[in-house]
Image (cartoon, helix red, strand yellow):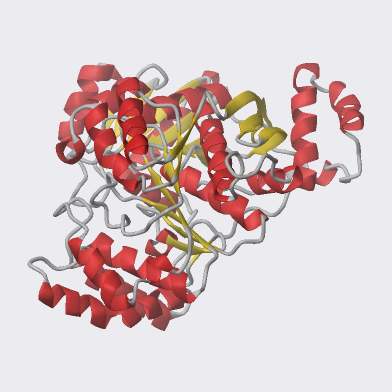
Amino acid sequence: MSEPRPSDRHDAPDPDDTFEEIVDEATQRDPDLAVIEAGSRTLRAHSGQPQGEAVPARPADPETDKALRAVEQELAGRWGETKLEPSVTRIAALMDVLGEPQRAYPSIHITGTNGKTSTARMIEALLNAFELRTGRYTSPHVQSITERISLDGSPIEPERFIETYEDIKPYVEMVDAQQPYRLSFFEVLTGMAYAAFADAPVDVAVVEVGMGGTWDATNVIDSTVAVVTPISLDHTDRLGTTHAEIAGEKAGVIKQGATVILAQQPVDAAQVMLKKAVEVDATVAREGMEFGVTSREIAVGGQLLTLRGLGGEYTDIFLPLYGAHQAHNAAVALSAVEAFFGIGAEQARSLDIDAIRKAFASVLSPGRLEVVRSSPTVVLDAAHNPAGAKAAADGISEAFSFSRLIGVVGTSGDKDVRGLLEAFEPIFAEIVVTQNSTARAMDVDELAAIAVEVFGDDRVQVEPRLDDALEAAITLAEEDDEYAGAGVLVTGSVITVGEARLLLGRG
């Protein structure tokens, strides 16, 4: 079959049905999957609703849409996210004139190379399950700029986004006038997020770094919990060319006396992190040592996990996301929330298992092995570096049974494109190279030249327009009866995935 079998919602058991009864019923259909599917259905029956709208559409009201576009245009006139002057001088000055809003609530700070946004969403869901009001700041966005600032699991309303911008704009202009360089796009958005969280007010902020850590604009918070997702080589022109150098920059989020939740890392990166923790008297919890994934099984629409946290073991957790990397993200997120509550250090107890199960069952992560169409199945994944591509390739191979997979790839020009393509080469029968609409996109002919070297000329098709690339890939997936189980994976960039999402009617 070409995609995981959807759950039969109209046949879903009453929550009071026992696990054993569902197994008996399911065994008549597929003995090998009976236990897994029964577990998935049982957990779905007890789960909460999915997180709020993950990718909002444009505002329906024309005047609101016009005002939002005006704000977007003003922000776009500032330095983009790839042009940096590495310091926190400007953002610190903005926080000062705003009255230090980032100190109005505790926070969990997330750095790393891959998995930051998915981990942030999981942490947010877990905190919401314990009735804490949350603010989440992540980047980049898939489709709408308002995705970057979320309150209680949902993107900030456009009206509130506009109001927040207008509220801080005079202070932004004041700082601009005092500094050698104006505040950047990312710095202004960071200021907006911290102000919006204070105004809400939130009980806790979940904050993803933009790049690095030490000089990242988000790093004006003093988080009690610092999370480090897996580190790999990315942004090497700014962060360093080795894992250790990159870890040195990212270690800047570790503050005095904090708890560090450390995902599995290359040895040299882990050494840098542990040294930093010793210097600032931080407590470290390491994946594979103090916490981790005990077991995982493929389930209908995701996976079933047993996680070992700082406070004990958590069983029968349904996560509606694909791939081993998401299971590891879940272990990191759980331990971060335990650390936030003081579990493992101050308290020897576990969190409520029912709340944990409901939280994880509600998690959404748009653009991360996200199925957006069937017949043929079209999957989106925002992998943009070799490590992310390897995780996506492993995840799609594990969760789907495609007879033939067509890739649609559009990348940014400043990435390790060859490494990304090499990670996907074993799973793509053919590849359609394209480019997204931004200035950062790699020229399609340059991308095609690298793709031909990796895949061979006969497996590469060039379509400069993304809409034509999607149509070509879908046609390739549908063209022969023998390929009835073929699928399409769109990847290479968050921007490419976001634009594909809109073209496929998910915006």
Residue drawn where x is 30% and y is 20% of the image: 422
Whether residue 330 is visible: yes
Residue 186 location, x and y as percent?
Answer: 27, 60
User: Where does the N terminus fall, quadrant-wise?
Assistant: top right
Of the pair 392 and 258, the residue shown nearer to us: 258
Q: Quadrant of residue 219?
A: bottom left
- Give the residue drawn at x 29%, y 46%: 213
Q: Is residue 467 visible?
A: no
Q: Is residue 240 shown left or right of residue 201? A: left
Q: What is the count of numbered marks?
A: 0
- In percent of width and height, residue 339 lies at 55, 44
Classify 87 as above or below 69: above
Q: Pick whichever, 406 or 182, lies toward us.
A: 182
Look at 39% across and 80% down and name the residue there. 163
Task: Examine the rendered structure and indicate whether residue 177 appears above or below residue 240.
Answer: below
What percent of the width, then of the height, locates residue 441? 21, 44
Name the residue nearer the viewer: 399 or 261: 261
Quarter of the image for residue 103 reads bottom left
Quadrant of res 357: top right
Residue drawn at point x = 83 percent, y = 42 percent: 12
Left or right: 337 with respect to 274?
A: right
